[in-house]
Amino acid sequence: MVRKADRVFLENMVHFTHMGHAVASQALYDAGASPKRVAGLVHREVEVLSDEAAIKKAGKTSGRIQEIVVAKIFAEFIGSIEDLGALCYAIRDRKNKSIFKAYAISFDEPNDFFEEIIANADAISDLAEVLDIPYLNELKDKIPPDVYEALEKAYDKCTRQIKGAAFFFRNMGRGQSAAPNPDEVVYIIFDTVDKDRPPRRPPSRGISVRVYNKTKHRFLVFDDIQPLLKAMDEEDVGMDIGYTTLSLLSDDVQAIKTMTMGIAQCKAEIAFIMTLLEDQGVTV
C-alpha cells in the first residue's frame, strides 16, 4: 500500500514536476538558437546600455551566449538523471521509508543506485528488478489486457532508459584521447583540489556529477582553458584542477536536449506505473 503522502508526490511527479529539467532545457535551447537577441537583452540589463549599444555589442558576444547555454543544458541533463536515480531509489526503498521522504532527503543514494544498476546490468531484464515491483508475468491474469499491454511497453522502455542513464551518469568524460577542436567545445572545470588540504579520499562521484555541481554552484566554465593552464604553470596558486569539454556542435547539443526529454518521460512513466498498479489493486 502506497502511503497517502507518497501518492500525492507520485501524482505530482506525473502531472507536473517531471517537466522541470525538460522545460529549462528547452528554454535554454531556444535561447541558444537566438544568441544575438539574448546577448543584446543581457548587455542592456546588466550593463545598463541603450538598445542600440546593446545590440551592437551583442554582435561580438553572441557566440559566448551559446557556450553558456550548452553548459547549462548539460547541467539540466545531469540534474534530470540525478533526479531519476533519486526517484528509482526512493521507490525501491519504499518498504523502509516514505517514497517522498527518501526522494526529498537523498544525497549519495542516486549515485549508489546507478552503481548498483551498472554492476548488475547484464542480469537486469525487467523493471521489477530495478524498482522491486511485481514482475510482468505476475500481472497478466490480474489486470485488463489493455492495461497489461501499456505496462509491458512502459516496463521495457523504462528499464532501457534507466540502464542508459546509469552508464552515462558514471562514464561521462572518460576515455577522451584526441585533443578537441577549440572552436567546437566549451571547457568545464569539475575538480578543484586545494594543495594545502588534499582530500582524504578520491572523489566517489562520477565526472558527470562533479561537472553538474561545479556548473550549478560555481559555473567554472571557460571558452578557452589554455590561458588559465599557462598561468597556473607559471605561478603556483596552490590548486590542482580537472576539466573536461562539452561539444558545441548542434547535433550534439540536440542529442543532450533529446535525452533530457527522455529522462523526463521516464520519471513520469515510473510514477504513473506506481499509481496505476495501486489503482488496479496490485500490492506494491
Image (cartoon, helix red, strand yellow):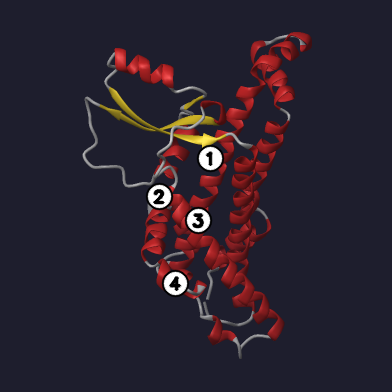
Residue ID for mark 4? 124
Q: Label 3: state its secondary structure.
A: helix
Q: Closer to us: mark 4 or mark 2?
A: 4
Relative to 41, is 183 on the left or the right?
left
Q: Are marks 1 and 4 in contact (CB under 8 Å)?
A: no
Horizontal and vertical percent for residue 239? 29, 24
- The 10 Å Cα crowd at callout 3, few under 14, some 14 to 19, many 20 or more, is many
- The kind of residue tagged 1 is Ala
Relative to 205, is 58 on the left or the right?
right
Residue ID for mark 2? 107
- The kind of residue tagged 3 is Ala
Q: Label 4: state its secondary structure.
A: loop
The residue positioned 67% from the left and 54% from the top of the image is: 16
Q: CA distance from mark 3 to mark 4?
A: 14 Å
The residue positioned 72% from the left and 12% from the top of the image is: 54
Q: Which of marks 3 and 1 precedes in the sequence? A: 1
Q: CA distance from mark 2 to mark 1?
A: 17 Å
Horizontal and vertical percent for residue 110? 43, 55
Residue ID for mark 3? 165
The residue positioned 51% from the left and 80% from the top of the image is: 135
